[in-house]
């Protein structure tokens, strides 16, 4: 739903859900898939992943994920910040449930969106938020520009989020996590053609699908070896065979992120 305002994102998800429901009626009696986490995976908590932030609107409704990388800096996706202003967003830490009221809420004093960003499928899908107050949670480390070997095909990566548990489905109230293998650039190119921008993106998922990030997980982390190595960005559907999730290739942007973290 990149490139759309949040209202449009919600409308698009609603339309997709309605279409999916109509399709389900038409295609019954095939058994409905059991609701699944992220898509595939398990519930977890922000105690287990203290750097995992909810990006919310001013009413604390979560719409994207983010990763705390210093007490006042959060890495998220540029497409999550389209149409947002410092006054329209909040960052919430220590809140495992979307409908929770606990944890720490911070305002945002600055939004840096990669200057070349236009849409998620063209790359540069990275943003850094500066918080108005410090988060009392341990930040995540992130890859440096020379760490490109972390993306070697087949490496286990962890995904996290409150996003929908199926394409066009509803968001998860509790934080979810799953692991997925990274996919080679050539294979991702086969899936997505010229929309796969190798310098800016990395793919992860099983050949057969079944486990993936989905709508609402955007901006959240792809962790490799416990460090932030990617940002949930886009994909065709969710968890579909042959269409892995696409993540921002953080090694390409880590120097720019560091400039923001230190700036
Ligand atoms: N663009 C989505 C969002 O805004 C994330 C989609 C990830 N899709 C996927 N198949 N991995 O939340």
Image (cartoon, rainbow, N blue to C red):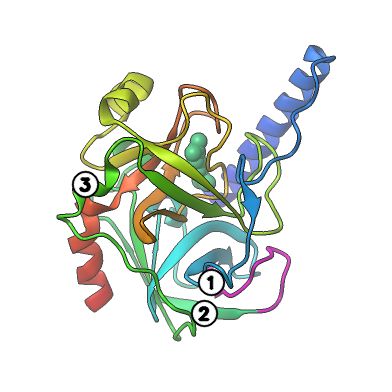
- Comparing 40 with 95, the one in front is 40
The residue drawn where x is 52% and y is 67% is 49
The magenta stretch is 88-102
Mark 2 crowdedness (10 Å alpha carbons): few <14, some 14-19, many ≥20:
some
Cβ(mark 2) to ligand 1 < 8 Å? Answer: no
Name the mark on residue 149. Answer: 3
Q: Within the image, what quadrant is residue 21 found in? A: top right
First-in-chain label (2 vs 1): 1
Q: Residue 181: percent from the left, percent from the top? A: 42, 38
Identity of the residue furthest to the left in this view? 146
In the picture provided, is 1 more to the left or to the right than 250? right
In the picture provided, is 97 more to the left or to the right than 72? right
Q: Residue 27: percent from the left, percent from the top? A: 78, 13
Residue behind mark 1: 90
87 within the magenta span? no
First-in-chain label (3 vs 2): 2
Mark 3 or 2: in front is: 3
Magenta span: chief secondary structure:
loop
First-in-chain label (3 vs 1): 1
The residue drawn where x is 55% and y is 65% is 54
Q: Evaluate whether residue 4 shows in this view.
A: no
Disc 3 + disc 2, Cβ < 8 Å: no
Q: Residue 13: percent from the left, percent from the top? A: 64, 38
In the picture provided, is 94 more to the left or to the right than 203? right
Q: CA distance from mark 2 to mark 1?
A: 6 Å
Q: CA distance from mark 3 to mark 1?
A: 34 Å
Disc 2 + disc 1, Cβ < 8 Å: yes
Element assignment for label 3: helix
Residue behind mark 2: 106
Q: Residue 238: percent from the left, percent from the top? A: 55, 33
In the picture provided, is 262 more to the left or to the right than 217? left
């Amino acid at each position: 739903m990149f490139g759309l305002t949040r209202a449009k994102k919600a409308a698009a998800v609603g339309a997709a859900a309605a279409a999916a429901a109509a399709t389900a009626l038409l295609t019954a009696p095939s058994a409905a898939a059991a609701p699944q986490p992220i898509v595939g995976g398990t519930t977890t908590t922000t105690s287990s992943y203290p750097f995992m932030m909810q990006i919310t609107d001013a009413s604390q409704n979560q719409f994207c994920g983010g990763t705390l990388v210093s007490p006042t800096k959060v890495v998220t996706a540029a497409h999550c910040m389209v149409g947002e202003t410092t006054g329209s967003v909040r960052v919430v830490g220590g809140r495992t449930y979307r409908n929770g009221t606990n944890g720490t809420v911070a305002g945002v004093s600055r939004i840096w969106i990669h200057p070349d960003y236009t849409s998620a499928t063209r790359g540069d899908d990275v943003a850094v938020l500066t918080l108005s107050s410090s988060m009392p949670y341990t930040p995540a480390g992130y890859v440096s520009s020379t760490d490109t070997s972390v993306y070697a095909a087949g490496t286990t990566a962890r995904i996290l989020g409150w996003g929908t548990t199926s394409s066009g489905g509803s968001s998860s109230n509790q934080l979810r996590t799953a692991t997925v293998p990274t996919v080679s650039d050539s294979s991702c190119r086969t899936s997505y053609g010229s929309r796969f921008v190798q310098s800016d993106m990395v793919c992860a998922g099983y050949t057969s699908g079944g486990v993936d990030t989905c709508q609402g997980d955007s901006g959240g982390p792809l962790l490799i070896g416990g460090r932030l190595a990617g940002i949930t960005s886009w994909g065709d559907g969710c968890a579909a065979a042959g269409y892995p999730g696409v993540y921002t290739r953080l090694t390409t942007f880590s120097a720019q992120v560091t400039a923001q973290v230190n700036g």
